[in-house]
Image: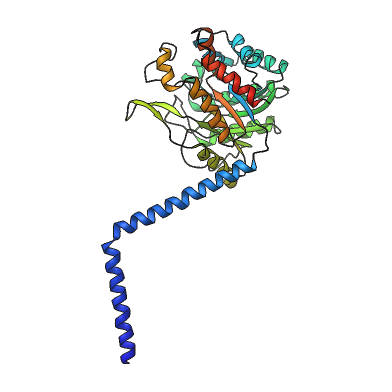
Amino acid sequence: MKHLNHNTKTSGRIKSKLLSWWHANFWNKVLIITFTILVISVGGMYGIAQWYIYSHKKTPLMIGATFIPDYAQSFGLDPKETLSAMIDDLGIKRVRLVSYWENGESQRGKYDMSFLDWQFEMAEKANVKVSLSIGLRQPRWPECHLPGWANKIPKSQWQPELEKYIAVVVNRYKDSPALDSYQLENEYFLKAFGECPDFSRDRLVSEYNLVKRLDPKRTLVVSMSNNALGTPLYEPTPDMWAISVYKRVWDKTFTHRYFEYPFPAWYYAFRAGWVQITRGHDSFIHELQAEAWLPSGIAIQDAPLAEQDKSLDAKRLKDRFEYGRATGMRTIDMWGVEWWYWRKVKMNDPSVWNVAKEEYKKSNK
């Protein structure tokens, strides 16, 4: 009995000392545990990233670009001349094109696809692959490109009209030898940017099902947005996911200066790998920032080149290509090619264009 009492007292003293030690060093332990969790988490992310990079290293690299005629015109450029220079001078073999609803159906029920026809014709002649953006939300401000008449009616009326327009676009180009994929509703759930009337998932799913019915064999892409950590959830599950990558922007909220996102390239390899593990499909970069992002209120067309260079110059552009390749994703669409060409032909500064030309040459080997 005495022996049992002695053991009980000893055990009690040990527990008391442990509790006393724990309370005396509480914050040290919280830091140690937090640091341990952080190391394990980052290590796991890095491991997934390296797995993704290794598993895709034999996939051919394809670096393309987004091209938007309206944006080229905003620089005073001839859109046909700009696309021709992209293909013939830069040697681009893949372009993401847009099918703005406001351009194709400016009058309700009257479709005019001539604005897109010539781009497909040029791509077909040059054996350039096209990723076609479809839906309401497509690249460039204001993001959602409703025709004026659709702005005046409720969603219950414009949604069926939008799906009719999507069907017109798909049926018109689905047999083009240039068409490689569709990208449905650019960064659909990014509510903080753009002027859009609707973010309902049921509309996205409905459009997805429509396109799959019309062209079931073609790759259908849905994009994620910006640098946020996470993975896509719920429906629809596309054939591929697309990721936007922005590196150097003007921070209008806190610092009021140019801000460089600190994410290493392998972070995006982790995101692609995690999506592949959890959703079963690969990802690519559909928008790699390759143009200047200037302070709010300053139009890029009006800014001095010295100011533009603070955000992106020739050296940073070269680094951006290298960064994209280092993510391990094997399809990359550059963002800002119209700006490169404007600097070359309107501002007599071919520096960024020449860097891009060298990088495309390197990638096309």
Q: Where does the image place residue 286, in percent across and percent down from the top left?
A: 56, 29
Q: In which quadrant of the rendered image does the C terminus lie?
A: top right
- In which quadrant of the rendered view does residue 329 lie? top right
Callout count: 0
| Residue at point 71%, 33% (across, down) | 217
Splitting the image into 4 quarters, where does residue 337 fall?
Answer: top right
Instruction: Residue 314: give x, y in percent of width and height.
Output: 50, 20
Please state if 276 lies on the left or on the right of 291 as rendered. Answer: right
Work out whether 287 lies above or below 268: above
Q: Nearer the viewer, residue 182 or 302?
A: 302
The chosen color scheme is rainbow
Q: Residue at x 69, y 14 (%)?
A: 121
Q: Give percent across and percent down for residue 190.
A: 46, 32
In this rendered view, identify the residue nearer to me: 111 or 192: 192
Q: Would you identify the image quadrant in which residue 178 lies? A: top right
78 shown above or below 142: above
Q: Report whether 151 appears left or right of 355.
A: left
Which quadrant is home to the N terminus? Answer: bottom left
299 in relation to 235, above or below: above
Asked whether the viewer can see residue 56, the reply is: yes
- Residue at 49% in and 34% down: 200
Confirm whether residue 111 shows in the render.
no
Horizontal and vertical percent position of residue 75? 50, 10
Q: What residue is shown at x 65% (from left), y 18% (from top)?
A: 91
